[in-house]
């Protein structure tokens, strides 16, 4: 619910804070008092386009902040998480508009974009203005609304999964056909490249192995000479390091017999002797294994040259050449098995199309059954709201396509993202008129009542928790006004409703009554909002009945209207 709205330096509003309650909030006030300014401020904090002209004259910036409670949903949490905005029990939306035209947005005190502010607002609040085409007036939302009414979540999910699988198979088929065409066009090149690469019998890591072996063969004499000198120094000469260390070890052992402080150095000396012995043995073995093989060196250089030439030709490393070899092998194998593979995918696509058609037909039947119920409910609602001869139609059409994925009774149809139905709400408000799309309904008063009828019919399924009706009473009075009021009251049991009205029959239904008035302060006009208690509530309704001069009879009538509202 909308818990509070804070406005500062916006249009005629200097500063005010309004708290709301669940149920039905009614806003009244004289024409020009600023009721629409209040809704305009709410619109601004919901991400609508802003103008610096809205900043109160003399102020540097306008601030609007809305605090909402119990509005979190998976969609809102996803939006906030994607923007790295902390999720809190309360949702705080704030918009600041400078006199220079700059706008800043915040969600939960974290800077946000106007776009994100609007996305979040669209999930929470549905604001119906007299001259605005709202959510229900957009044909692309009608399918979702009908599905909500029909409870087709499972069927729609099943359809989308089946369609996604079909699209994936078709993509596989397309990729396979394209690859096959490429292979056919380049078969001679593929064969030549594969034969050329195969002729070298490539082995992974061979280039590094050859490089290492060439280095050893090229330096065989140097290695032999160095190893011989090292052996002489370590072990073979008369004054070798090994002999010196062995003598040192013997001396340390003798010293330790006299002074135990030498004990700790005995093991170190033995380790030194062992290390030198091990190095000498390794050097002797290594020397005996040195390969003096010019023929082997020439062979390796020739192999290395061939590999380098092929790598340079194809612009790849050795591992890249092996990858290319595997890719060419796969292309050849693909061509050999192409017909079999295409037949397999064709069979899968045929089966998947049949499955998709079955699922689409099941979904469509459920929608058609729900559409009949919805038509009846909305026509009843419209009759109660003073449009007794209205005809409401849920149009469900299908688009024939020769190559369509959906096949029903030997006809092929286009498969859309959520079914094969094209859904649009049509209405005729007067006898003899052909039903037309909702978006083409011109009368503001009719639009408001149609919106109310739609909302009442879809109340249980509509996921928007807050509904705002601006001037819903345009063009109605008397019995119809009472019916509109009762409808709003019933709807407020499922949604928080905020409505601007001039009619006492609607105002009497309020759970919370806010009165907007203008006053003069320091030679400037200021719009203020007052929360009415029971007595003020009756006074305001009486004023709507009789005008400024409130009579006892108008007060009595107001009391009767309020009492009657309690039984709705």
Image: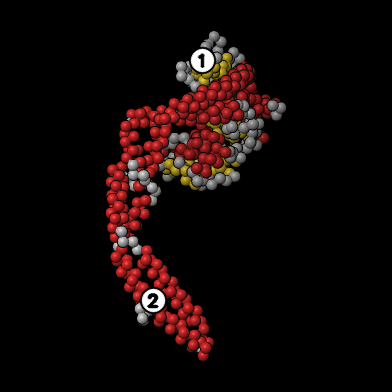
Q: Is residue 138 visible?
A: no
Residue at position x 40%, y 82% in the image:
244
Q: Is residue 134 above or below residue 435?
A: below
Residue found at x 34% / y 34%: 191
Percent coordinates x, y for residue 6 in the rendering: 53, 42
Instruction: Provide residue 150's location: percent of width, then percent of height.
Output: 61, 24
- The C terminus is located in which quarter? top right
Label 1 residue SS: strand
Residue holding disc 1:
411
Left or right, residue 32 beside residue 556: left
Q: Residue furthest top?
A: 432
Q: Is residue 433 left or right of residue 543?
A: left
Instruction: Give residue 207's position: percent from left, percent from top.
Output: 34, 51
Characterize the local packing of mark 2: few (<14), some (14-19) or many (20 or more) Cα atoms within 10 angstroms: some
Say which residue label 2 marks: 235
Residue at position x 64%, y 31% in the image: 494
Q: Element under label 2?
A: helix
Give the mark toward the camera: 1 or 2. Answer: 2
Query: Image height check: is 438 above or below 160?
Result: above
């Amino acid at each position: 619910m909308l818990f509070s709205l804070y406005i500062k330096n916006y249009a005629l509003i200097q500063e005010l804070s309004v708290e709301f309650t669940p149920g039905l909030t009614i806003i009244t006030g004289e024409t020009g008092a600023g009721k629409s300014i209040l809704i305009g401020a709410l619109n601004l904090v919901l991400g609508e386009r802003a103008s610096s002209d809205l900043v109160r004259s003399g102020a540097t910036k306008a601030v609007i902040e809305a605090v909402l409670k119990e509005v979190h949903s998976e969609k809102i949490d996803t939006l906030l998480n994607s923007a790295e905005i902390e999720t809190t029990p309360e949702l705080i939306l704030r918009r600041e508009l400078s006199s220079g035209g700059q706008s800043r947005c915040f969600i939960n005190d974290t800077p946000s974009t106007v776009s994100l502010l609007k996305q979040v607002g669209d999930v929470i609040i549905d604001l119906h203005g007299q001259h605005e085409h709202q959510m229900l007036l957009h044909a692309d939302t009608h399918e979702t609304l009908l599905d909500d009414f029909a409870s087709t979540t499972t069927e729609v999910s099943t359809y989308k999964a089946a369609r996604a699988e079909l699209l994936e198979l078709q993509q596989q088929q397309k990729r396979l056909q394209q690859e096959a065409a490429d292979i056919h066009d380049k078969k001679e090149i593929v064969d030549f490249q594969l034969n050329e690469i195969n002729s070298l019998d490539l082995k992974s890591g061979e280039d590094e192995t050859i490089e290492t072996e060439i280095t050893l063969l090229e330096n065989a004499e140097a290695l032999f000479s160095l190893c011989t000198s090292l052996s002489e120094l370590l072990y073979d000469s008369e004054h070798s390091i090994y002999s010196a260390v062995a003598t040192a070890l013997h001396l340390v052992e003798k010293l330790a017999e006299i002074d135990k402080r030498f004990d700790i150095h005995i093991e170190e000396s033995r380790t030194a002797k062992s290390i030198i012995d091990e190095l000498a043995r390794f050097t002797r073995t290594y020397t005996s294994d040195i390969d003096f093989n010019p023929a082997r060196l020439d062979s390796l250089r020739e192999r290395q040259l061939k590999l380098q030439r092929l790598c340079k030709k194809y612009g790849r490393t050795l591992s890249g050449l092996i990858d290319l070899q595997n890719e060419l092998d796969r292309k050849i194998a693909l061509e050999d098995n192409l017909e079999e593979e295409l037949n397999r995918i064709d069979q899968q696509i045929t089966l998947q199309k049949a499955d998709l058609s079955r699922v689409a037909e099941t979904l469509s039947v459920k929608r058609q059954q729900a559409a009949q119920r919805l038509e009846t409910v909305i026509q009843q609602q419209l009759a109660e709201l003073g449009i007794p001869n209205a005809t409401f139609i849920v149009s469900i059409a299908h688009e024939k396509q020769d190559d369509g994925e959906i096949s029903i009774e030997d006809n092929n149809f286009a498969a859309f993202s959520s079914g094969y139905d094209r859904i649009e709400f049509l209405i005729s408000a007067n006898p003899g008129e052909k039903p037309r799309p909702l978006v083409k309904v011109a009368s503001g008063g009719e639009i408001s009542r149609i919106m109310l009828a739609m909302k009442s019919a879809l109340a249980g399924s509509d996921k928007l928790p807050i509904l705002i009706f601006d001037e819903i009473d345009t063009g109605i009075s008397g019995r119809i006004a009472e019916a509109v009021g009762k409808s709003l009251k019933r709807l407020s049991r499922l949604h928080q409703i905020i409505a601007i009205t001039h009619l006492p029959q609607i105002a009497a239904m309020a759970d919370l009554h806010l009165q907007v008035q203008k006053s003069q302060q320091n030679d400037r006009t200021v719009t203020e909002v007052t929360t009415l208690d029971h007595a003020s509530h009756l006074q305001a309704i009486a004023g709507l009945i009789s005008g400024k001069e409130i009579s006892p009879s108008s007060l009595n009538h107001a009391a009767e209207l309020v009492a009657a509202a309690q039984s709705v």
